[in-house]
Amino acid sequence: MNPTCNFCKYKVYYKKQSYEVESMEQNELKLIRQVTYPSLPEQPVALLQSRLYQDSETGQMTLYLDMQNVSDKTVEATYVNLCCFDEEVQLVSTKNREPFESLGAEPGARFGEEMAIPLSSFRIRSITATVQRVCFSDGSVWNNGEAEKDVRVFQEDAPLSTKKPKKKWKRWVFSILFLLLVSALGVGIGYGHSQWTKATEEARNLLLAESYAQAEEAYAALQHPWLPESIRQEFGWYQALCAIKRGDFHTGIRLLADQPTHSKSVSLLRQMNTLLSGTISAGEAHTVGLCADGTAKATGENQDRQCEVSEWKDLVAVSAGWNHTLGLTAEGKVLYAGSDEIDAQTIATWEDAVTVSAGGRHSVAALANGRVVATGDNRYNQCDTQNWSGVIAVAAGRYHTVGLRQDGTVLAIGNGHGGSCRVEDWKDIVSIAAGDGFTLGVTKDGKVLAAGAYSRYGTVAEIEEDAVAVFAGGSHAIAKMKDGTLQSGGSNTWHQSDVMHWENLLSAEAGTKHTVAISVDGKAFAMGDRQNGPCDVDDWKGLGLPKKALRLTSVDSYLMQIKVQ
């Protein structure tokens, strides 16, 4: 006969395991994601680790949760809530009260590691698990967010015992003295823990109430050095989300870059770098800037009508090429300014784009489904990107194209003379750039990688830390640092590399003979060849990233994930 949980009145049973953990390779199960959870001292059952697998033949998703009884009582049943997310951290499904029953887990015992939880959707790529309810062998129950409830059922007609109890006063005296000693030693620690728990809850409530400035300050105040690194990173992650939501993208980028071992921070850093790279762009001899209101500004050479962007509206990105300009609208449509009518007609058919890049004489866009479309000059096959997948950012050089995938790897195609396309070994990349014969990348640890013509990127490749983004020009390279300054390398014939005195920058871009940047307060800067006016940006104001551009990232999905936890 199966025992029952008095509180839930549910039948308690063992979940049958369909296959052992040790035989996963035989069953061709692929490990999709493994997460170690931080310790939560107020819970009687600790969630130690989750492992998400996918059957390579059937696509079936299966989850295993490793838990431990950290209470002083035997656990009979544990109920866990699950939130399932796809690759872009969009909520796929929820499973409330997933049961682990008939456990008989003694204090300190681990369980759940071999209990398979089948999941319905093949799109699931991450899981958030929360222990919701714990039933003990004595009939008491712990609920998440509530005090423990004693629900034992007593028989009212049971006869009272007439046997006198043994005298236990000595034991009681010893127990009282021991408790007094422990209380005296632990009162300070207990009070501090109580205050810390209260402050954590207040910070979370501010975040959920969308009071982002106050929530950011509250999480900053919780960053104590005695906390485990995993918890400190989670608080830093919340700070970054708050900064981004209130429009302080510079602070958000810095906070994300400070956490290279936090997977969600690294993923969002890639997405934010992609967005910010579309706020200002430098071409052969013209410059284009994105305004925070979704309009665009342009200056410089206009022989091919590449600066005719004043009518563009509802933009979230711009990109300047050799003699043409691209714009991306909030709806995913790509706009074109230039003389090539064939390219213009092709680009007008593109839909659901999330980022664009204008190269020498070709144009590239990454779509929401991770595919890449390209048109224009294809003499070196730089437009043959139709087989690419999982791409979230693209960079079009003069004769080659580079793509950054969500997993941090890089693709390249086109004129690889000199090694500009030798990026197959790059990993953990958060920013890419393609110039004239060379390619740049930044790792999650802030190191700059380079491939191709060394003389064109020079000392930038020697940066070992604190870089967050890179920009490639005709014969020079620029790296943006965490503190909002720039480092440069390569040619300086037109003083295009004399940019290290600029500060508080949101983004930058390297053109053929000039460099441009915008500051956090929306002003523009330019250095380099001034012929035809590509550097005439001194009076530009109001530049920046429109807030609606955040829909192209997972920021709102991450916040939704926090709300449903």
Image: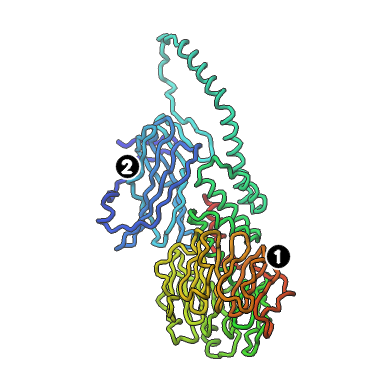
- Give the residue displayed 34% in from the left and 49% down from the top: 116
Q: Is residue 563 above or below residue 489?
A: above
Mark 2 lies on residue = 14
Q: Where in the figure is residue 259, as x and y percent of width and height?
A: 52, 54
Q: Nearer the viewer, mark 1 or mark 2?
A: 1
Amino acid type assigned to the residue bearing label 2 in the image: Tyr
Q: Is residue 559 left or right of residue 501?
A: left
Mark 1 lies on residue = 521
Tell me, yes or no, whether the two marked residues, 1 and 2, touch with CB atoms within 8 Å: no
Judging depth in this view, the residue of 540 and 385 nearest the camera is 540
Q: Where in the figure is residue 316, as x and y percent of width and height?
A: 61, 72
Amino acid type assigned to the residue bearing label 1 in the image: Asp
Q: Residues within 10 Å of mark 1 (few under 14, many from 20)?
A: few
Q: Where in the figure is residue 334, as x and y percent of width and height?
A: 56, 79
Judging depth in this view, the residue of 329 and 186 nearest the camera is 186
Q: Where in the figure is residue 123, as x and y percent of width and height?
A: 41, 62
| Residue 483 falls in image quadrant | bottom right
Q: Is residue 230 above or below residue 545?
A: above
Report how many numbered discs are placed on residues in the image: 2
Name the element at disc 2.
loop
- Residue 412: mark in rendering: none
Q: Residues within 10 Å of mark 2 (few under 14, many from 20)?
A: few
Name the element at disc 1.
loop
- Give the residue displayed 53% in from the left and 41% down from the top: 227
Q: Residue furthest right?
A: 539
Q: Is residue 505 left or right of residue 258?
A: right
Query: Residue 67: in sight, yes or no?
Result: yes
Query: Residue 332: in sight, yes or no?
Result: no
Marks 1 and 2, how far apart at CA: 60 Å
**Quarter of the image containing the N terminus?**
top left
